DNA sequence: GTTGAAATTAGTACGAA
DNA sequence: TTCGTACTAATTTCAAC
């Protein structure tokens, strides 16, 4: 299993220095940018693209790996060609105090590609890849529903995956449309946070009501 | 942008032979399995782990790449350490006949890591990574809401990412709990499909119809 | 953090089974 | 096709600056 359990830790608004890891500078970010596009690039080529020496590239590369900033390298596969053409999202309501069991069961389900615990109407969202719609149905009704920790599910199908980026970096902010934080010295808003029009339903809020925005 | 537009194509229930690509055998799958765990493994080591010669490994590796089964290699990064500690899901209702515009706008938003068009209550789900909650709020209210194609949004936060697998393979099915399709010859149910208790709300519901952009 | 040379390894191109 | 081998090119390591 790929346990990503870690502190959800609210953003500090201080990119580049989080927790007790190593401090990421602009060159580290540049390395990550290159590695996201091409995870198999040689360190020598990486050094050239980033503008540092080979040795430095090795040092930084290894540091990023050892520090856990880079968790792993992987190949992105075309699910359809690999035989799993159907993708679905299953929103799950989990019985209180049964999270541990829920997690344990998920680890036993290899067809689950992603699982996140969320706020809002449901407690968790899982993404599954299957060969056909019937298989999704079987998974949800037979395997998920049989987990005691699962109180209810709601399934939607993915009709098309418009885009998937390997991961997002803070530096991405500078691309695309002008951002309201283009100036380098503008202080980030306090983390008290305005929730404005956002529908931020607490996960605990006994999912009695769900109102969609007009 | 990373356009993944491709036929959503309902599952045919015929793993290993989809579309006009190359036919994937057990060794191909094994290669994919290794590459998913370690995208930077050398072809020589790959050959050894899979049990074929180095030359064959090169041939198959190249074929998988050229055929598009392997779309790309990438590094998996710890978002928190990279400075983006907050992840949110934004469910979007899109105005009819404005899908093209919606897609175009998304391409301009680098902080969007994933976007899928779904059935159900909403039309699309996007996943974003930001430094803090305020940034998510700004993104949703200022940038998403200003897109004409966006009719409504609903945001939930991800409290914890329980698991993420690089991708799922049909062979994963054999692991974990016993599957109702363990026998090799059991014919898959017809693709007409039982939808049983599943909450399969049509995407068209309440919205006339949805036409996907080619 | 950089350079440069040595040792190792990767990638390619054959012929043979 | 796949395998084995040899040849060439590139990469990684390690040294000194």
Image (spheres, coloured by chain):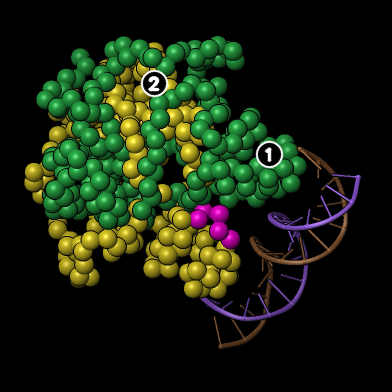
Chain colours: A green, B yellow, C brown, D purple
Characterize the local packing of mark 1: few (<14), some (14-19) or many (20 or more) Cα atoms within 10 angstroms: few
Residue B42 lies, in percent from the top left, at 58, 61
Residue A154 lies, in percent from the top left, at 16, 38
Residue A40 in view of the camera: yes
- Residue at image x 22%, y 34%? A123
Q: Main secondary structure of the magenta part?
A: loop
- Residue at image x 38%, y 33%? A8
Residue A182 lies, in percent from the top left, at 55, 14
| Parent chain of label 1 | A
Quadrant of the rendering where the C terminus of chain A is positioned: top left
Placement of A161 over or under A176, stated as above or below: below
Q: Where does label 2 land, which residue? A: B133
What number is the disc on residue A49?
1
Q: Which residues are magenta?
A: B38-42
Residue C13 lies, in percent from the top left, at 69, 68
| Left or right, residue B96 beside residue C1 | left
Is residue D4 or residue B84 the one in the foreground? B84
| Left or right, residue C16 beside residue B205 | right
């Amino acid at each position: 299993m790929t346990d990503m359990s870690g502190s959800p830790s609210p953003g500090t608004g201080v990119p580049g220095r989080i927790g007790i890891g190593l401090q990421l500078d602009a060159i580290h970010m540049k390395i990550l940018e290159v590695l996201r596009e091409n995870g198999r690039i040689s360190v020598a080529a990486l050094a050239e693209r980033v503008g540092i020496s080979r040795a430095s590239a090795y040092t930084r590369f290894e540091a990023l790996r050892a520090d856990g900033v880079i968790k792993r390298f992987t190949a992105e596969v075309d699910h359809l060609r690999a035989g799993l053409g159907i993708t679905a999202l299953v929103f799950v309501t989990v019985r209180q105090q049964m999270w541990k069991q829920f997690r344990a069961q998920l680890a036993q389900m290899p067809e689950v590609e992603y699982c996140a615990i969320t706020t809002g109407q449901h407690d968790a969202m899982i993404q599954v890849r299957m060969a056909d719609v019937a298989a999704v149905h079987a998974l949800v009704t037979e395997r998920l529903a049989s987990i005691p920790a699962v109180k209810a599910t709601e399934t939607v199908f993915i009709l098309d995956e418009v885009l998937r980026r390997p991961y997002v970096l803070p530096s991405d902010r500078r691309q695309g449309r002008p951002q309201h934080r283009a100036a380098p010295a503008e202080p980030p808003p306090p983390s008290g946070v305005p929730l404005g029009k956002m529908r931020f339903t607490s996960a605990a809020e006994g999912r009695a009501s769900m109102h969609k925005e007009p």
